[in-house]
Amino acid sequence: MTTPTPQAGARTYQVLANTFISVPVLLGIVVFVVQSSQSDSPQVSWLAVVVPLVIAALSWMLCEQIGYRLAPLESARAGTDVQQVAFARFQTSAMVRVALCEVPMLVAVALTFLSPPASVGNYLPGGLASLVLLFMHVRPTRAVVGRSEAALDRNGGHSGLSATFGF
């Protein structure tokens, strides 16, 4: 059985990241369809607006603080093994960031159905906040990959993570 190359893993990660980014939009459509059949009231609960936005701010801070903590590579490692280890560590930290970024959306969905009046407007602040956080911390941009690469290379190792993503 062959081990996939880091470049193939990068392409797979890009597809996975785009899938995670589409979740708040698709969930917003589901909430709209469900709520439009249940309620004619376009009113929005202040609780359903404030709580997801506060949680989004906390999620952003946690992503900044713990989302890019990767164990550094040893400078003695060489070759494809280094790239595979670096990419595996990148993926692990990315899944932590995905989980943190989706929390405001999940709270918004819960509050949409729990706090009266029920409307899609209750979902939008948390859904949009999660969408922004996912674009900032999960989508494989130069900034996201560069921060991860800097953490991996801080002890003299060379991960080549930017090259794996084609940057």
Image: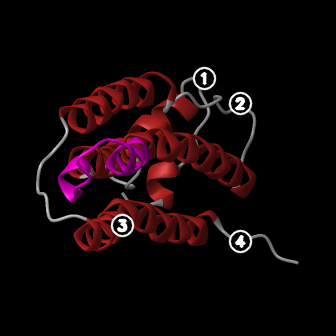
Disc number for residue 74: 2
Q: Which of marks 3 and 2 is nearer the N terminus?
A: 3
Q: Tell which circle, 2 or 1, labels the residue nearer the N-terminal end.
A: 2
Q: Where is residue 75 in the image (x, y as percent from the top left)?
A: 68, 31
In the image, what residue occupies the spot 35% across and 50% down? Answer: 134
- Among numbered discs 4 and 1, the one appearing first in the sequence: 4
Towards the viewer: 110 or 99: 110
Question: Is disc 1 surrounded by few (<14), some (14 to 19) or many (20+) residues within 10 Å?
Answer: few
- Write down the region rendered in magenta: 106-122
On screen, 147 above or below 85? Answer: above
- For mark 2, give the secondary structure: loop
Residue 119 belongs to the span the image colors magenta = yes
Q: Mark 3 points at which residue?
A: 22
Q: Looking at the picture, which amino acid does disc 3 mark?
A: Ser
Q: Residue at x 65, y 29 (%)?
A: 71
Residue that carries the numbered disc 4 in the rendered image: 4
User: Do callouts 3 and 4 mark residues in contact (Cβ within 8 Å)?
Assistant: no
Q: Name the one closer to the observer, 130 or 145.
A: 130
**In the rendered structure, are the residues bearing label 1 and label 3 in contact, judged by CB atoms less than 8 Å apart?**
no
**Residue 121 rendering spot, x and y as whole percentages:** 18, 52
Q: How far apart are marks 4 and 1 (CA)?
A: 26 Å
Q: Which is closer to the viewer, label 4 or label 1?
A: 4
Compared with residue 20, is residue 45 higher up or lower down, i.e. above or below?
above
Residue that extends furthest to the left in the rendered view of this protein: 42
User: Residue tagged by mark 1?
Assistant: 155
Q: Which of marks 3 and 4 is in front?
A: 3
Identify whether 80 is placed above or below 152: below
Tell me, yes or no, whether the highlighted magenta stretch contains residue 57. no
